[in-house]
Image: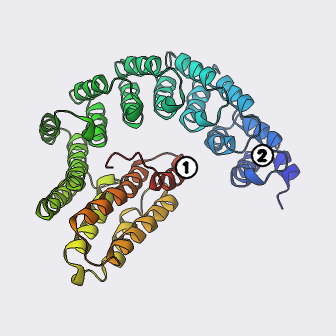
Amino acid sequence: MVDQEKIHNRCLSNDPEARIYAFEELKNFFSFMPDKQQAWNDLLRLTSDKNHDVRSSAFRALDSAFFDIPDKQQAWNDLLRLINDKDHDVRSSASRVLDYVFIQVPDKQQAWNDLFRLTKDKDWLVRSNAAEALGSAFSQVPDKQQAWNDLHRLINDENIFVRISATLALESAFSQMPDKQQALNNLLRLINDKDHEVRSSAAYALGSVFSHFSDKRQAWNDLLKLTNDQNIYVRSSSNHSLGRVSIFMASQAETEENYKKELEEAIKFFEIATKEVSYNNPAKFCLLFYRSFYTIISKRQEAKEEVNKYLEEAKAAIEDSEGKKQLFEAVQYLAEALKEVQNMGDLDLSEMKDELSFYSKYCDYAAELMSRTDEKAPFAAEVLRKAANSSTYILK
C-alpha cells in the first residue's frame, strides 16, 4: 500500500535526493494515491524546487498525473499559472505538456483561447509547444476555421522550431482541416523552407497526407526532388515518405504484380532512408516490418522463421532508443500481425491489400514511437492501441 504521508514528507525534505525519490514515487504510484489532489499539489510544489534536477523531474510527471486528477479544470489552471511564470525554464517546461492534457479539459473553448494566447507568447519555446498542442486539440475545437487561421499564422512564424511544431500540428490535424487545399499548399511551401529541419518535417508530413493530393504526380515529384537535398535528414525523411506513399499505392493496386512491385519500391525507399540516417530512424522500423511482410506473402514456404527473425532485428534496432519499453510493446503488436498473415494461407489480391492497409497503421504508429525523443513516449503505446481500432486511417 502507498504511504502517501511519507511521500508528502519527503517532498518537504531539505535533502534534494529525498525530494527526487518522492517525485519518483509520485510519478509511479499517482493513480494509487488516496488523496490525488494532495499528490498533485506536491508535484506542483516540486516544479518550483530550488534544485534544477528536482524541478525538471517534476514537470515530466505532470502530464501523466493529469489523467488521474479529479478537478481537471483546476489542474489546467495550475498549468497555465506555471506557463505564465517569470522563469523561462518553468514556462517552457510547463508548456510541453499542453498537447497531452488538452483533451482532458472540460471547457474546450476556454482552453483553446488559452492556447491561442500562448501561440503569441514572446518565448519561442512556449509558442512551439502551444503550436504542437494545436494539432492534438484541433478536433475538439468548435470553430475550426479560426483554429486553422491560428495554425496558419504559426506556420509562418519567424522561429524555425515554431514552424516545425506547426508543421507537425498540420499533419496530425489534417483530416479536420476546413480547407485542405490551402493546407496542402502550405506543406508544399514548407518543403522549400530555408531551414533543413523545417524541410525535413514537411517532407515527412507529405507522406502522411499524400492521398489527399489531387495532383499526386506533382507531390511525388516534389518528394523525389527532396531526395537530392543537401541535408541528410531531409533526404531521409523524403525517402521515408516515398516509402509510405508506395505502401499507399500498393493498397490501391489493381493487379497482384503491381501490388508486389509497389511493396518492393516501398522497401527500397525505406532502406535508402535508413542508410541516410542510421540512428533512431523510424524508417528502420518500417523497413524491418515490410520486408518481413513481403517475404511472408511472396515466399510463404521460405518464411517459417520470418516472425522470429523480425522480432530479433526489430528489438536490436530499438535497443538504444528512448521509450524502449513502449517500443518493445509495439514490436510485439507487429509480430502478432505478421503471425496472422502467416497463418492465413494463400491470399488473393483483395485480401493482401486489406492486410497491408490494416497493419500499416501499426507500423506507422510504431515508427512514430521510435522517432520520439522525449519523456512523453509512455502515452504513445496507448495511441498505438487506439490506432489499431481507428477507422479513419489514411490508407483506408
Residue 72 placement (x, y as % from top left): 71, 34
> In the displayed structure, does residue 392 sit left or right of residue 3?
left
Q: Which of 248 and 333 is in front in this view?
A: 248
Answer above or below: position of 230 versus 288: above
Q: Nearer the viewer, mark 1 or mark 2?
A: 1
Q: In this view, does 317 lie to the left or right of 270?
A: right
Residue at 81% over, 39% down: 37
Which disc, if any, is residue 379?
1
Gap between marks 1 and 2 measured at Cα: 31 Å
The crowd level at tag 1 (other Cα within 10 Å; few <14, some 14-19, many 20+) is: some
**Residue 15: which disc?**
2
Q: In this view, does 384 lie above or below 149?
A: below
Tell me if label 1 and label 2 are in contact, CB under 8 Å: no
Q: Residue 353 placed where, x, y %?
A: 26, 60
Pick the front one: 22 or 248:
248
Name which residue lies at 25% across and 38% down: 203
